[in-house]
Amino acid sequence: MIRKKLIAGNWKMNKTATEAAPLAQEIVAAAGRNTDVDIVVCPPFTALETVGKIVDGSSIKLGAQNMHPEAGGAYTGEISAAMLRDLFATHVILGHSERRSYFGETDAFINKKVTASLKNQLKPILCVGETLAEREAGTTLKVVQTQVEVGLEGVSNDDITNVVIAYEPVWAIGTGKVATTEQAQEVHAFIRELLTKLYGEALAQKIRILYGGSMKPANAPELLAQKDIDGGLIGGAALESRSFLELINAAAAAK
């Protein structure tokens, strides 16, 4: 089955609303009518409204970088799914390795976010992946299996095709290191097998699995040519329009 490639830009804690506007404008100008690849931009919370207005009417979707699982209440500093939907966000990154390591987010807590996002018509990009210590210990697949299974607990067959999985080898994020194409495909294929066990072959073949380990224009064509790599969750290369657009073009060429 041919799955439409997805390129999602995670801007992390970069770009004020003022700085975000020209970047979003450049992306819309160059790729706003692109229908060969699904494109999502995920600016910081403070720039969501600004970027949302710029991408409105284009083929580019708006995503957030996180959300709280509760609908509202005394959660100072947090953002709810309804708040994101009110700004016309369609996607939300959940369980990013930085949330897990810096803020102590557990698989169970991330699962609450996944189910809450789906209830609010937000498409979660569920991030999974191992640390360097876990890879060196030979536990990569065990770690990923737990993160996938717990992260998707309670997600129905009806909802699973609205979920995107992003495999991010933590040791390859922002370090300049990149998993080899073979390493990346191995884990992507393993995730696909897990999804098949959980949801059946037909649904598993519809779920997109992104690579989130420092994908750049130089390595994107080889990675995107792999059977089970359906796009990228892009960090540093998403902060500059030229490199981000090169990745979109690489994804279009790989379809």
Image (cartoon, helix red, strand yellow):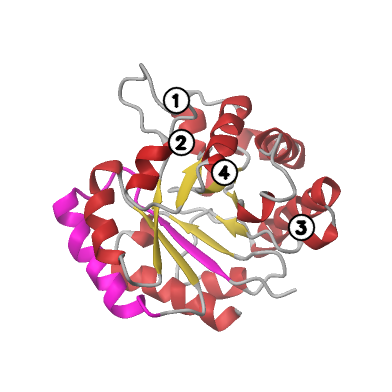
Which segment is the magenta one?
5-33
Q: Nearer the viewer, mark 3 or mark 2?
A: 3
| Image quarter hosting the N terminus | bottom right
| Residue 253 horizontal/vertical position (percent) | 54, 83
112 vs 100, nearest the viewer: 112
Q: Earlier in the sequence, mark 3 or mark 2?
A: 2
Determine whether label 1 and label 2 are within 8 Å by CB.
Answer: yes
Does the magenta segment cover residue 119?
no
Q: Which residue is mark 4?
A: 118
| Residue 153 horizontal/vertical position (percent) | 71, 34
Q: Amino acid at mark 4?
A: Leu
Does the magenta segment cover residue 12?
yes
Question: Badge 1, how many Cα within 10 Å: few under 14, some, many 20+?
Answer: few
| Residue 156 horizontal/vertical position (percent) | 72, 43
Q: Residue at x 71, y 35 (%)?
A: 154
Q: Secondary structure at mark 3?
A: helix
| Image quarter hosting the C terminus | bottom right
Res 225 seen here: yes
Q: Nearer the viewer, mark 1 or mark 3?
A: 3
| Residue 33 horizontal/vertical position (percent) | 38, 80
Q: Amino acid at mark 3?
A: Ala
Q: Which residue is mark 3?
A: 204
Q: Nearer the viewer, mark 4 or mark 1?
A: 4
Q: Which residue is mark 2?
A: 98
In 3D space, how far apart are the residues under numbered discs 1 and 3 (Cα atoms)?
31 Å
The label shown at residue 103 is 1
Q: Residue at x 39, y 25 (%)?
A: 72
Q: Relative to residue 245, is residue 128 depicted above or below?
A: above
Q: Relative to residue 118, is residue 164 depicted above or below?
A: below
Q: Earlier in the sequence, mark 1 or mark 3?
A: 1
Q: Secondary structure at mark 4?
A: helix
